[in-house]
Amino acid sequence: MQTSSYTLHTVLEHYNNLRWHFQDFTYCKTNRPFKFNQQLLEFPDTATSAFNLISRIVIEPTVGRYIQEADFGGDSWLNTRFASATREITTYKNRDEAVRRLLADSPYLLDWKEYYSAIEEDLNAARYSQHAAAFVLTLLPNLKKFNLSSA
């Protein structure tokens, strides 16, 4: 009986964490202490760009359903502030293949390879990706209110 109680507690804790991070979404939101802004890139539930949010949704689609309100104004802000903000530091490279499959399966894209290439070019240059920002909106079925980036 102890095992199922522990499991239920763990599941509830996980979903409460997702609700806290994503129901009223904003980039760089965290409930963890940190000394330097660059540490935000290490927290898996703290998205710093549209591409990070897409990659988070692709590994756990529930995340996209949690988002009801979103402020996308800080998209890529952190990535563009660090001279050392390389693609390897600002994204989870192990999620790239899953993101490519998601784009390939999307009914919204005519040429997913070209679209992904444009996103990748922005990521490699550590700049805001309008392509990623537009695509992430297709993954948020419960989005009611949002603010877009002015970048």
Image (cartoon, rainbow, N blue to C red):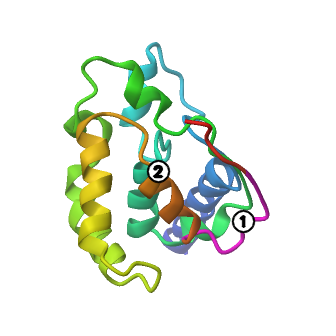
Depth-wise, is mark 1 or mark 2 nearer the camera? 2
Residue 33 — which label?
A: none
Residue for badge 2: 130
Foreground residue among 42 and 69: 69
Residue for badge 1: 143
Foreground residue among 23 and 135: 135
User: Of label 1 and label 2, which has the lower sequence position?
Assistant: 2
Q: Main secondary structure of the magenta part?
A: loop
Q: Residues within 10 Å of mark 1 (few under 14, many from 20)?
A: some
Foreground residue among 119 and 43: 119
Foreground residue among 151 and 19: 151
Counting from the top left corner in percent of width and height, residue 80 is at: 39, 26
- Residue at (49, 29) in percent of width and height: 77
Q: What kind of element bears circle 1? A: loop
Counting from the top left corner in percent of width and height, residue 104 is at: 30, 80
Three-letter amino acid code of the residue under disc 2: Gln
- Residue at (34, 19) in percent of width and height: 82
Look at the image and say whether residue 142 sits in the magenta stretch: yes
Q: What kind of element bears circle 2? A: helix
> In this picture, is 20 found above or below 42?
below
> In this picture, is 31 found above or below 45?
above
